[in-house]
Amino acid sequence: MSLLFDETDDHVAIADHAALALPDADWTIAGWMKPDSLAGTASQFILSWNHFNYLPSLNWWFREASHPSEPGKIKFRIKDDADQLEVMSPTAVITTTAWHHLCLVRAGDTFTQYVNAAAAGAATTSIIDAVDPSVAWLFGAVFGFDADSYLGGRLAEWAKWDRALSADERAALAAGLAPAFFPHGLSWHIPMCGDAVEQVAGLTTTIQGAVAAEHPPRIILPPPPRSMRGAPLHVHPAHVFRSPVVAGA
């Protein structure tokens, strides 16, 4: 399953935690998003970490189909304690209501966003340092809850790594492998299997309105540890599988 957001007031909040921090080093944020509708002239926010114009902050959003200047484009804006960087896809990449795999990577001084494993805008700068607003992280809404900026659609399998995933790893995620296949550097993971339970760091999450919906097709989950095979697994029902596992097949 995934979480469905109604574009009215639904969101998921992650309470402030050290695991959210984006270091002055490599990192990756990735997950799945399926918009329900692209109609409109505004923006839909995938995630928001602090107010849009505040220092520090991170915001990631896409423009709706009738936006006057940037229809279908996806953008992120990141700010540390002094400077900001904003990157927009050079072409429209959110143009259907299909599932999209999204990935935002810092590798050295280069920041790149990917849609379905294809680069969709990048910039290189040395001005961005560590980012840690020490506030809640939001999915499906902009900080401040602007009425025209809520997400209408589904989110699933969101995670963050304290390293830059390789091209092969990004392609594997976009092909359906779950984040748990890549545990090295994995600092948090929220499968969003109808709830918002975080699997790695024990982050505190709160769901406002979002409800369970279908999972992305063919999400492949890793097998249970060898020591647990044949034993009951006390995990979310959506994750009780045997290897190899394909969810939604």
Image (cartoon, rainbow, N blue to C red):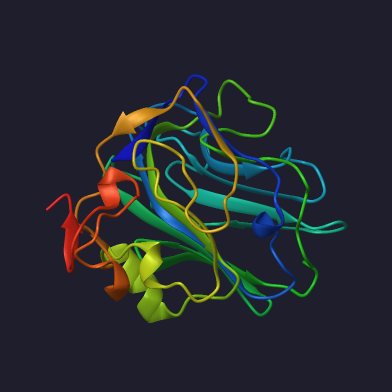
Image side of residue 12 versus residue 114, left or right: right
User: Residue 222, image x and y in percent?
Assistant: 28, 67
The quadrant of the image that shows the N terminus is top left
Along the viewing direction, whichever of 26 and 241 lies nearer the viewer: 241
- Please determine whether, in this image, residue 64 is positioned above or below residue 235: above
**Image point (55%, 76%), residue name:** 164
Q: Is residue 95 visible?
A: yes
Image side of residue 211 versus residue 183, left or right: left
Along the viewing direction, whichever of 182 and 118 lies nearer the viewer: 182
Most extreme residue toward the right, as rendered? 82
Q: Is residue 92 visible?
A: no
**Image point (78%, 49%), residue name:** 133
- Please determine whether, in this image, residue 231 is positioned above or below residue 3: below
User: Residue 149, image x and y in percent?
Assistant: 56, 29
Image side of residue 209 versus residue 56, left or right: left
Image side of residue 16 versus residue 226, left or right: right
Most extreme residue toward the left, as rendered? 249
